[in-house]
Amino acid sequence: MYHNIQFSKKMMMKAQYSKNLTIADFIVILVAAGISWLLFTRFVSPFLQALAPIETAAITYLMLSPSSVYDKKNYQVLMQIVRKSRRTYHAIQRPIYQFHEEKEGVRHGRI
């Protein structure tokens, strides 16, 4: 009565650097830190020159880490919130009820 089910033993896995980051995310963090270092070396004091890439790497890590929404990262969820429509949707009365109300209104002289 038992059935044997055949399945493939190959597994699809992402190339990951850590539990939360893929290798591409790690490269994006390094590039962001490098760009901030290049920008801040000309405009700020030497103390802040060392601090800027660290802060940029930390912020980029937080934005690239997974969110509580399944299969989304924090920056994707943030973009959905920013682009969300602010309109309020109201229920539309079913047309068959509107027709009956209009008919009764004409019959009783309301319209």
Image (cartoon, rainbow, N blue to C red):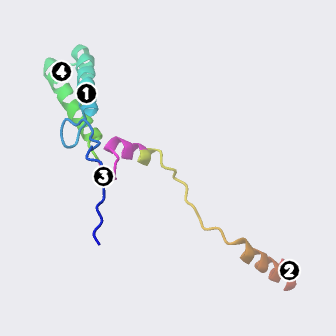
> Which one is earlier in the sequence, the residue at label 2 or at label 3?
3
Instruction: Name the residue beneath numbered marker 3.
Output: 7
Image quarter (top left, top right, bottom left or bottom right) of the N terminus: bottom left
Q: Residues within 10 Å of mark 2 (few under 14, many from 20)?
A: few
Q: Position of residue 82 (x, y in %)?
A: 43, 45
Instruction: Name the residue beneath numbered marker 1.
Output: 27
109 is higher (above) or lower (below) than 93: below
Helix, strand or loop status at disc 2 = helix
Cα distance between the residues tagged 1 and 4: 21 Å
Q: Amino acid at mark 2?
A: Val
Q: Amino acid at mark 4?
A: Gln
Query: Horizontally, is 66 left or right of 108 in the view?
Result: left
Q: Position of residue 74 (x, y in %)?
A: 32, 44
Mark 2 vs mark 3, foreground winner is: 3
Helix, strand or loop status at disc 3 = loop
Helix, strand or loop status at disc 4 = helix
Q: Which mark is residue 49?
A: 4
Q: Which residues are magenta?
A: 67-79
Cα distance between the residues tagged 2 and 3: 69 Å
Q: Residue at x 28, y 39 (%)?
A: 64
Q: Residue at x 26, y 41 (%)?
A: 13
Q: Residue at x 25, y 30 (%)?
A: 29
Q: Residues within 10 Å of mark 3 (few under 14, many from 20)?
A: few
Q: Residues within 10 Å of mark 1 (few under 14, many from 20)?
A: few
